[in-house]
Image: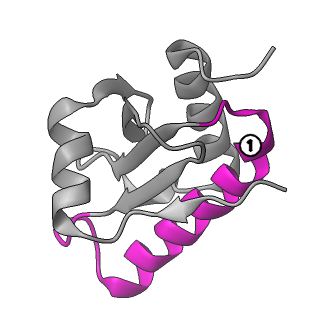
């Protein structure tokens, strides 16, 4: 099983958000940037304006779990930041919707290993 490190510092998020390539699904957005390391870095950000803390943490848990399922199929050496779209309703925060979006984004970015 691959070990993915989390992005925690503000400058790490800013670096990926400013220099990374943007991909969009129906309910999540992703910024993906190639890094020089041999492992992936994952960052998750859900705006305070979306919902209260319980719902935001629920969305983050769903995103982490979906990523954990797909990380075996993803190439190494990328920094990925997921954002929840502000215009998307919280009721669409289901495991299936997030998983579909994540597969769509990774396929579009060409991150799946052959």
Toward which corner of the image does residue 94 lie, by quadrant? bottom right
* Residue occupied by mark 1: 70
- Front-most of 72 and 100? 72
In the depicted structure, whether residue 69 falls above or below residue 27? below
- Front-most of 96 and 29? 29
Secondary structure at badge 1 equals helix
For the point 54% across and 37% down, the residue is 77
**Spot occupied by residue 103 in the image (x, y as percentages of width and height):** 65, 30
- Asked whether, in this view, residue 92 is left or right of residue 48, the answer is right
Toward which corner of the image does residue 55 lie, by quadrant? bottom left
**Spot occupied by residue 80 in the image (x, y as percentages of width and height):** 43, 43
How does the figure colour the protein chain or chains? one colour
**Which region shows up in magenta?**
47-76
For the point 48% across and 58% down, the residue is 91
Query: Which quarter of the rendering shows the N terminus?
Result: bottom right
- Front-most of 42 and 47? 42
Residue 48 part of the magenta-drawn span: yes
Q: Main secondary structure of the magenta part?
A: helix
In the depicted structure, whether residue 66 falls above or below residue 9? above
For the point 26% across and 42% down, the residue is 16
- Asked whether, in this view, residue 87 is left or right of residue 106, the answer is left
Query: Which quarter of the rendering shows the C terminus?
Result: top right
Residue 24 part of the magenta-drawn span: no
**Spot occupied by residue 106 in the image (x, y as percentages of width and height):** 58, 26
């Amino acid at each position: 099983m691959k070990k993915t490190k989390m992005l925690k510092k503000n400058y790490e998020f800013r670096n990926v958000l400013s220099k990374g390539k943007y991909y969009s699904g129906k309910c999540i957005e992703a910024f993906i940037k190639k890094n020089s390391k041999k492992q992936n870095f994952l960052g998750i950000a859900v705006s305070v304006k979306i919902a209260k803390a319980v719902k935001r943490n629920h969305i983050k848990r769903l995103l982490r779990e979906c990523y954990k399922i797909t990380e075996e199929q993803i190439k190494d050496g990328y920094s990925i930041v997921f954002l929840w779209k502000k215009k998307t309703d919280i009721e669409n925060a289901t495991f299936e919707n997030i998983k579909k979006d994540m597969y769509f984004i990774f396929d579009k970015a060409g991150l799946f290993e052959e």
